[in-house]
Image (spheres, rainbow, N blue to C red):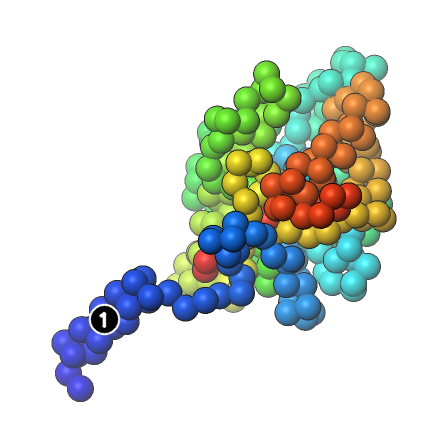
């Protein structure tokens, strides 16, 4: 078969795949608009890596899942790209702290949270970039750091921020910075870059052997978009998630408000995913890779 014939057949295959896609269990049923449970049974001995912009992002997005993965005996890693040196809501704890001191406070809070979720310190990676200024650093520099971590730890599953902005989620309606934060969406983009480059043998071979994760998920938090997957955190997982988030003491004054926020996130995803009343859930959007 000539090279031209092979090229033509490949072209036909791509057209057919787009026009007549095969059903995939990893995607939601767009007709019924129904999410499906995360396929944890198919993950086997997978290593799972959460890659987010800030300390406390992972707890809000997937704290219940992280704790459950630990209880299932899976290895869980966290990569946090910024140092949290700009956010202080509890002036008694950090009101007089310098940016460097605040960054140290935030890192200790992450360690305390990890202890509740079952994630050891050695599985946490802090890139240390300035909070709110992730975009000011060279994309190539940040990506290389992420690629190095990915090749060392070799995660099979990666979870990160959605790269899209959602202006339906405005701060005045209680969504804080979920709909848009310059670090949030950009950290998702950087993660996708790293997933791609980590699997390319000729890209930065000095950073280790090529490795590409099998699955990538975005945190699904938009109430107007039904995600592909959910994870039921009703009960102990929801409790652990909340207690882990409460370790971020520099970020709030009233623990009751934070408990209410964690409850709201679980109920919101129950509604968005069309789950039975009383179920608390975390949502995730599978990304075709």
Q: Which of the pair 281/4 is nearer the observer?
A: 281
* Label 1 sits on residue: 12
At a point 16% along the width and 79% down the height, the residue shown is 5
Q: Which of the pair 73/174 is nearer the observer?
A: 174
Residue 138 higher or lower than 96, as above or below: below
Quadrant location of residue 10?
Answer: bottom left
Q: Is residue 46 visible?
A: no
At a point 66% along the width and 25% down the height, the residue shown is 85
Q: Which of the pair 56/264 is nearer the observer?
A: 264
Q: Is residue 48 visible?
A: yes
Which quadrant, please, contains the C terminus?
bottom left
At a point 46% along the width and 29% down the height, the residue shown is 136
Left or right relative to 96: residue 284:
left
Q: Which of the pair 65/154 is nearer the observer?
A: 65
Which quadrant, please, contains the N terminus?
bottom left
Q: Residues within 10 Å of mark 1 (few under 14, many from 20)?
A: few
Give how far across and how far down residue 130 sits, in percent: 58, 28
Q: Element under label 1?
A: helix
Give how far across and how far down residue 253 sits, in percent: 81, 18
Residue 15 higher or lower than 163, as above or below: below
Give how far across and how far down residue 178 sits, in percent: 58, 30
């Amino acid at each position: 078969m000539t090279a031209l014939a092979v090229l033509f057949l490949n072209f036909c295959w791509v057209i057919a795949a787009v026009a007549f896609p095969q059903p995939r269990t990893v995607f939601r049923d767009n007709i019924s608009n129904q999410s499906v449970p995360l396929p944890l049974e198919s993950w086997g001995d997978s290593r799972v890596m959460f890659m987010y912009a800030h300390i406390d992002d992972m707890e809000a997005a997937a704290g219940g899942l992280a704790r459950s993965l630990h209880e299932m005996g899976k290895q869980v890693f966290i990569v946090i790209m910024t140092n949290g040196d700009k956010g202080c809501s509890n002036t008694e704890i950090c009101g007089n702290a310098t940016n460097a001191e605040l960054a140290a406070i935030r890192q200790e809070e992450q360690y305390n949270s990890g202890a509740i979720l079952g994630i050891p310190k050695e599985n946490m990676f802090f890139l240390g970039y300035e909070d709110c200024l992730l975009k000011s650093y060279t994309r190539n520099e940040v990506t290389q750091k992420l690629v190095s971590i990915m090749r060392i730890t070799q995660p099979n599953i990666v979870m990160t921020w959605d790269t899209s902005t959602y202006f339906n989620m405005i701060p005045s309606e209680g969504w804080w910075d979920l709909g848009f934060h310059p670090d949030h969406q950009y950290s998702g983009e950087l993660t996708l870059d790293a997933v791609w480059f980590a699997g390319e043998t000729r890209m930065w071979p000095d950073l280790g052997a090529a490795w590409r994760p099998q699955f990538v998920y975005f945190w699904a938090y938009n109430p107007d978009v039904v995600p592909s997957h959910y994870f039921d955190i009703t009960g102990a997982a929801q409790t652990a998630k909340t207690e882990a988030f409460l370790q971020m003491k520099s970020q709030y004054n009233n623990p009751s408000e934070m408990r209410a926020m964690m409850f709201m996130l679980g109920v919101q995803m129950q509604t968005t995913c069309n789950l039975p009343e009383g179920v608390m859930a975390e949502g995730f959007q599978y990304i075709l890779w």
